[in-house]
Image (cartoon, grey):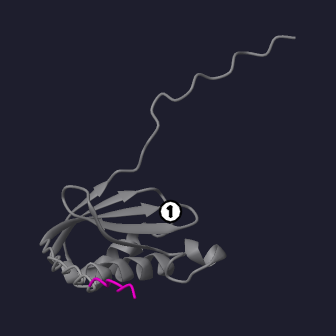
Amino acid sequence: MAESTTTPPAPAPKKKKKIKRTVPKARACIHAGENNTIVTFTDLQGQKLAGASAGSCGFKGTRKSTPYAAKIAAETAAQAVAGFGVESVQVEIRGLGPGREQAIRGIQGAGINLEAIIDRTPIAHGGCRPAGRRRV
């Protein structure tokens, strides 16, 4: 009779403890478009901590482009970043959508201090060369 050799099961790999980062100062980037408002929290190096948009908060269609939806998106993103210990933020706004002001109020309503509000809306200067005069 041939003996079967069985090896004992290998021990499970030890899981590394996840180190919880604390970020007291962060940056809140608000993209206020015509159809949606996107709020993203990053650390000062630019690594994303959390984010939310009006669409991810359950608003669809034309309701995404309302100031109320922008406020809810900002509050949701601020709650998601609360685990990192964020106390104060620099707010950078991009775009001319209807949710600009309300998104800032949503961040304030979540209990986060605002250090600065910076408008980073891209404004064209110069632009493309216009078409030449039509000759018939």
Q: Amino acid at mark 1?
A: Gly
Q: In this orientation, which residue lies closer to the viewer: 50 or 117?
A: 50
Quadrant in which the N terminus is drawn: bottom left
State left or right for residue 96 relative to residue 74.
Answer: right
Query: Height in image: 27 above or below 14?
Result: above
Quadrant in which the C terminus is drawn: top right
State left or right for residue 72 relative to residue 50.
Answer: right
What number of labels is visible?
1
* Residue that appears at 15% across and 80% down: 17
Query: Height in image: 64 above or below 43?
Result: below
Quarter assignment of residue 41 = bottom left
Q: In this orientation, which residue lies closer to the viewer: 132 or 26?
A: 26
* Residue that appears at 45% across and 56% down: 95
**Residue 50 locus on image (x, y percent):** 32, 72
**Residue 83 locus on image (x, y percent):** 21, 83
Taking the magenta stretch, the answer to whether it contains residue 6 is yes
- Segment tinted magenta in the rendering: 1-7
**Residue 8 locus on image (x, y percent):** 26, 86
* Residue that appears at 26% across and 78% down: 81
Taking the magenta stretch, the answer to whether it contains residue 29 is no
Return the residue found at the far front. Answer: 1
For the residue labelled by badge 1, is the local secondary structure a helix, a strand or a loop?
A: loop
Quarter assignment of residue 79 = bottom left
Label 1: how many Cα within 10 Å (few below 14, some 14–19, many 20+): some
| Majority SS type along the magenta span | loop
* Residue that appears at 36% across and 59% down: 93
Return the residue found at the far right. Answer: 136
Name the residue tied to disc 1.
97
**Residue 68 locus on image (x, y percent):** 48, 81
